[in-house]
Image (tube, rainbow, N blue to C red):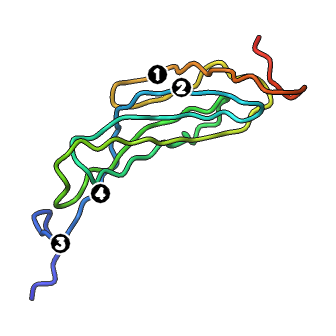
Amino acid sequence: MGGGIPSLSDTNLAVLVEELCRGSYTAEQFLHVVTLKAEGSHPTGGYQVFLKRNPVYVFPPSFTLTHIRPVGEANQQITPFLKTSQFECIDAVKEILIVDAAGSHQVEVKQVKGEGPETPTCE
């Protein structure tokens, strides 16, 4: 009976911890939209991956790549992931800062040519 606090060894208790993940990154800007892509893989299936905009107000915004490990059984094969995030910007963005398990990365933003006067210009 007990009714005490469950221990971490209790198989019904899952501890979900968000950890820094590793990836490779690309970014491009078309007109007023900047798209950031994070790609990578995990040794098994079941990982939840997040590409989060950091809450600190800086421009251009910075991002963090994290994951939550699978709980319980997971398929035993390398599983790729692709996460994207977008934000709007009137001016051309040169770089985006991303933090992951390997450290900080300055990702160059490729300017994609568009039609018309709304194409941002790089300085």
Residue found 61% across the figure and 35% down from its top:
35
Residue 75 point in image, percent of width and height = 19, 54
Answer whether labels 1 and 2 touch (C-beta < 8 Å).
Answer: yes
Residue found 17% across the figure and 72% down from its top:
12
Q: Which residue is mark 4?
A: 16
Q: Quadrant of residue 56?
A: top right
Total of numbered circles in the picture? 4
- The secondary element bearing badge 3 is classed as loop
Would residue 47 be found to the left or right of residue 51 on screen?
Answer: left
Q: Amino acid at mark 4?
A: Leu
- Mark 1 or mark 2: whose residue is earlier in sequence: 2
Location of residue 38 with respect to 121 vertically, above or below: below
Residue 85 point in image, percent of width and height = 57, 41
Q: Which residue is mark 1?
A: 105
Mark 1–mark 3 Cα distance, whole angstroms, equals 38 Å
Mark identifier at residue 114: none
Mark 4–mark 2 Cα distance, whole angstroms, equals 26 Å
Would residue 49 be found to the left or right of residue 54 on screen?
Answer: left
- The secondary element bearing badge 1 is classed as strand
- Mark 1 or mark 3: whose residue is earlier in sequence: 3
Q: Which residue is mark 3?
A: 12
Q: Quadrant of residue 112?
A: top right
Quarter that holds the C terminus: top right
Quarter that holds the N terminus: bottom left
Location of residue 10 with respect to 65 vertically, above or below: below
Residue 104 point in image, percent of width and height = 44, 23
Residue found 88% across the figure and 27% down from its top:
116
Q: Which residue is mark 2?
A: 97
- Depth check, front residue: 60 or 107: 107
Q: Amino acid at mark 2?
A: Leu
Mark 2 nearby-residue class (10 Å; few <14, some 14–19, many ≥20): some
Answer whether labels 3 and 4 touch (C-beta < 8 Å).
Answer: no
